Image: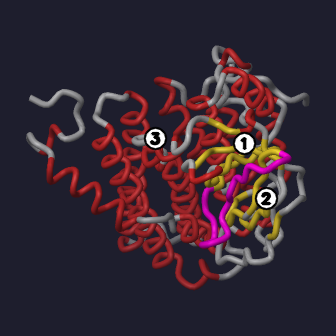
Amino acid sequence: MDQVTPRALSYDAVAVARHVAATAATRAEAQDRDDGFPTEDVADLARLGLLAAPVPSWAGGAGLGEELGARRLAAVLRLVGYGSLALGRLYEGHVNALQLVARYGTPEQRERLFADACNGHLFGVWNTEPLGSGLVLEDGADGMRLTGVKTFASGAGFVTRALVTSRGPGGSGTVMLVIPLTPGSRADLSAWQPHGMRASATGTLDFAGIAVAAEDILGDPDDYFRQPDFSSGAWRFAAVQLGGIESVFDAWREHLAATGRSGDPHQLARLGEGAIAVEGARLWVERAAETVSDGVLPPKRVVAFVNLARLAVERAGLDVLQLAQRSVGLQGFLRPHPLERLSRDLATYLRQPGPDRALTAAAEEILNARGMAGDLWEGAVP
């Protein structure tokens, strides 16, 4: 099948994501190794149009996530994460990069980079770096060049368009760059030997010596950290996590049915508690996506809500893991039981940065807010 170039009016991204999830789930076990990567699944994302879907419709995409389409994007991220959390992590980074291009790119940059996405390039956003060896953009006699590395870069060696943050020349602030990369180059995955998410190819990328042109610089200095966009985007990884929570829940549910334990009232009680957690997480994700996209609340209130949402999803994931492992017992810790890998991947992906800071920042905003509790997240406060 030829690669799909989606159009907003005819392309059903949710249906495509459901298909990708079903296929990815059948491959995930084989990819669960230290040198694993969902190569065929990423190819499916390109072939079936999901890499192009976040591109605006005027540029050949489906406008996934634009304006009132946040709930649709949440469903796509959830479904891809359901099939494979490693694949979901990669796809969320791709979406994030394209949204940053849409927000801060010049018309020429948008046209060029959106065309790259439509042509099957995988984008990623990498901002983590080791102390003292992070990316620096230096301006020399022969032009601008990069020094330094990025760490915890998911898709290292496979992402071909990397959106990275770097310190600008002469202390000019943090700049965003979109750097073309050759597959298999500059990546070191030797340290990536994790408990879960083994197939995400998360490693270190050495950018030393890469030449940078003015057209590679995206936006103005420190645009990357502009609020509420910087923090409110956390709802996207929460949507992927939700997919992983649902896959754990379904593996648990299928185990109870297959082993004839569905009549045990204790098992039913645990399953009911798990269902409450799953549905609560889904509602938080959907509301967070809508809160970000509708732009009604002031920026600090938007960030506070998304911070609460990401923590509510984390709590739901931990609760479902505990309940599922308690119900299934030792079998769920043994390969090849589906729960074994799904639990490792979810437990690893739930570990997102700064959870305590997210909670206290949200609480501070709530404490300083006026009005009734029921009005905190509404656009118009009496």
Q: Is residue 138 magenta?
A: yes
The magenta span reads: 127-142
> What residue does disc 3 label?
229
N-term-proximal mark, 3 vs 2: 2
> What residue does disc 1 label?
178
User: Mark 1 to mark 2: distance in Å?
Assistant: 12 Å
**From this viewpoint, which residue is outermost toward the bottom?**
330
Does residue 216 appear to the left or right of 324 in the view shown? right
Give above or below for 70 relative to 31: above
Does residue 172 appear to the left or right of 201 in the view shown? left
Q: Residues within 10 Å of mark 1 (few under 14, many from 20)?
A: many
Kind of residue indicated by mark 2 = Phe
User: Mark 1 to mark 3: distance in Å?
Assistant: 18 Å
Q: Residues within 10 Å of mark 3 (few under 14, many from 20)?
A: some
N-term-proximal mark, 1 vs 3: 1
> What residue does disc 2 label?
207
Kind of residue indicated by mark 3 = Asp
Kind of residue indicated by mark 1 = Val
Secondary element at image label 2: loop
Q: Are marks 1 and 3 in contact (CB under 8 Å)?
A: no
Q: Is residue 228 magenta?
A: no
Secondary element at image label 3: helix
Give the number of the mark in front: 1 or 3: 1
Give above or below for 135 relative to 52: below
User: Mark 3 to mark 2: distance in Å?
Assistant: 26 Å
Classify the position of the N terminus by image quarter: top right
Q: Residue at x 15, y 41 (%)?
A: 374
Q: Nearer the viewer, residue 62 or 16?
A: 62
Q: Residue at x 54, y 26 (%)?
A: 66
Q: Position of residue 256 (x, y in %)?
A: 53, 68
